[in-house]
Image (cartoon, helix red, strand yellow):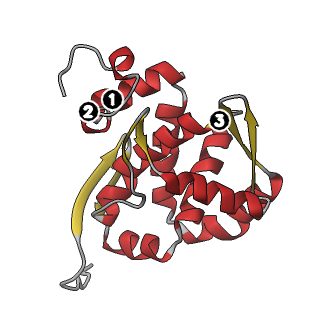
Amino acid sequence: MSEKVEKDEEWDFLEIEDVKLVYVGKLKANLKKLPPQAILLAILVKYFEKFKEVKITKFTKITFEVEKKVFEPILSGPLLSFKADNFGPFTREIYDILGFLQNLDLVKIEKEGDKTEIILTDKGVEVFRERIKKEIPEVVLKLIEIVVERYGSLDHDELLHRVYKEYPEFAGKSVVRDKYYQGVSY
């Protein structure tokens, strides 16, 4: 049982709960072929498999956690361009991608006051199941599911506290950091 390994393939170790990856070269190649819109839709579908609703701030933080714990280790770099902002990690790309998905009727965006809710449509679920799910390796979907479940179950305050504690470099510009990130210097 020998397997030829090409020189440019990467061997890394990635573990989240019971899912362990040792070889990420093929995963990296598969994921690099996918547009960020497909990956964001996958995160949304995995979120809505477990939870009923999501506000944009929470979804941004969960996407950030998926990026840090799943995509950065596999891709050896970021998928999206998160930066420190008023409420922790932020990227305009999420809003742009959600707008794109909304134009395709894959999601609905509903604003009420200062809160924005994301709603996954039946068409979004169908496109994921018929097309995107087949393109994303099953092990990556499982990793996304684990991270989404772990962080999606937290309420807003717990989630921000955890993100700020794990990634203090993204709390530096936050206007609410004192509320969520106590006792640690930046």
In contact (CB < 8 Å): disc 3 and disc 1: no
Q: Residue at left 56%, top 50%? A: 43
Residue 106 in percent (x, y) is at 75, 58
In contact (CB < 8 Å): disc 1 and disc 2: yes
Q: Earlier in the sequence, mark 3 or mark 2?
A: 3
Q: Which residue is mark 2?
A: 168
Image vertical order of residue 46 relative to residue 177, above or below: below
Judged by depth in the image, the label closer to the viewer, 3 or 2, is: 2
The residues tagged by marks 3 and 1 sit, at their Cα atoms, a distance apart of 20 Å
Q: Quadrant of residue 29?
A: bottom left
Q: Nearer the viewer, residue 108 or 46?
A: 108
Q: Which residue is mark 3?
A: 54
Please indicate whether residue 179 sits to the left or right of residue 7 in the image: right
Q: Residue at left 31%, top 20%? A: 181
Residue 163 in percent (x, y) is at 37, 32
Report whether residue 124 is seen: yes
Locate the N terminus and report the quarter of the image it occupies. Answer: bottom left
The type of residue carrying mark 2 is Pro
Image vertical order of residue 97 relative to residue 109, above or below: below
Q: Which residue is mark 1?
A: 164
Secondary element under disc 2, as helix, strand or loop, is helix
Q: Nearer the viewer, residue 67 or 178?
A: 178
Q: Quadrant of residue 26?
A: bottom left
